[in-house]
Image (cartoon, grey):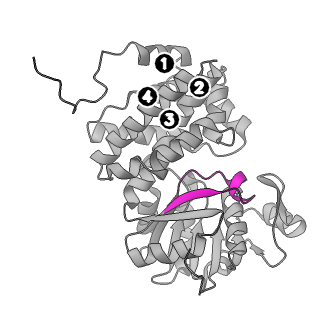
Amino acid sequence: MADKTDIADIGIIGAGSWGTALAVLLHKNGCKVTLWSIIKEEIEMLKREHEHKDKLPGVKLPEEMVFTTELEEAIKEKDILVLAVPSPYTRSTSRSMKEYVAKGQIVVNVAKGIEEKSLLTLSQIIEEEIPQAEVAVLSGPSHAEEVGRGIPTTIVVGAKKKETAEYLQNIFMNEAFRVYISPDVLGIELGAALKNVVALAAGIADGLGYGDNTKAALITRGITEIARLGTAMGGRFETFCGLTGIGDLIVTCASMHSRNRRAGILIGKGYSMEEAMKEVKMVVEGVYSAKAAMALAKKYQVQIPIIEQVNAVLFDNKAAADAVKELMIRDKKLENSDIPWEER
């Protein structure tokens, strides 16, 4: 592991479970951390309790950490900004940040999603709203509940410049948080966003009472859909075989930490999409990415049958059991169309 010769001053924009977990991680790495939230009550609770009682219970925050509702305080003269707000708020928060961000200041997006109206990834939104920033992404199979407690985790940092990726790798990496780097920012973000939609499908299957066979099928065919669409859009196939593709998909489909899986379970049990989101009490990113995924599939003429059925259940009142049945009785297919048959 690289020697941390620089102690970074970092502003984390968003004090949800992931932003708070990263604040704890970065403080342990020797960084100075300022944690921002737009919610006054949340910041008052963090100042008083030094623990996020709602989102990350049991993880204590150090006394030296700064908590604020003032964006300027969280942004100005910081070496790195970590943007950790839920994906539906990426654009509005970026727009509010713009006036305080210096030219070349690094903004690391750690949320996952695709904007429904524009079909842009979150880093593309940030670049549009804060053109003076240098934008990077951090993603992978990384539940906040585990990162906050120091459970071994491996992720990927994506950036256009290798030196930026290496700098961030050095800042974030420690003995419990292994960081790889990649130039495929697009592939990383597409894998991160689309896996949330497949995780909804996995949760729906669980809610219907289906078993391990069904889960394995959804994960395997789900990553095929993700890679099919992602490569058509310009992502690298290798990325979808890695941590931010199959790795993130496995953890999100299998873990009860996953808000997307938990929402899917409720939908499989008969809850509406709105009822499930209310019950989970957190932003279910896959719901916001599902329609965007269908629009992208249409634009790039790619078939994504699992994601298509998730959309039908979420937005067209299709019965979950009927959606699974339709997936099972689709036309017969080859598993891999590029493998040649032996000729007689």
Residue 182: image location, x then y, percent: 41, 64
Whole-Å distance between the Cαs marked 1 and 3? 13 Å
Question: Residue sitting at 57 percent across and 63 percent down?
Answer: 178
Q: Earlier in the sequence, mark 1 or mark 3?
A: 3
SS type, badge 4: helix
> Viewed as shown, does residue 296 lie left or right of 222?
left
The residue labelled by disc 4 is 306
On residue 323, the disc is 1
Given residues 38 and 179, the one toward you in this image is 179
The reply to whether residue 118 is visible in this rendering is no
Question: Which residue position is annotated with label 3?
Answer: 198
The mark that comes first in sequence, 3 or 4, is 3
Tags 3 and 4 touching, CB below 8 Å: yes
Pointers 4 and 2 in contact (CB under 8 A)? no
Which kind of residue does numbered mark 2 sit on? Answer: Ile
Q: Tag 1: residue type?
A: Ala
Question: 25 and 283: which one is in front?
Answer: 25
Cα distance, mark 3 to mark 2? 10 Å
Range of residues picked out in magenta: 139-156
Marks 3 and 2, the one that precedes in the sequence: 3
For label 2, the crowd category at 10 Å Cα-Cα, with few meaning under 14, some 14 to 19 and many 20 or more, is many
Quote the CA–CA distance across marks 2 and 1: 10 Å
| Image quadrant occupied by the C terminus | top left
| Mark seen at residue 155 | none
Which residue is under mark 2? 204
The image shows a total of numbered marks equal to 4
User: Height in image: 108 above or below 194?
Assistant: below
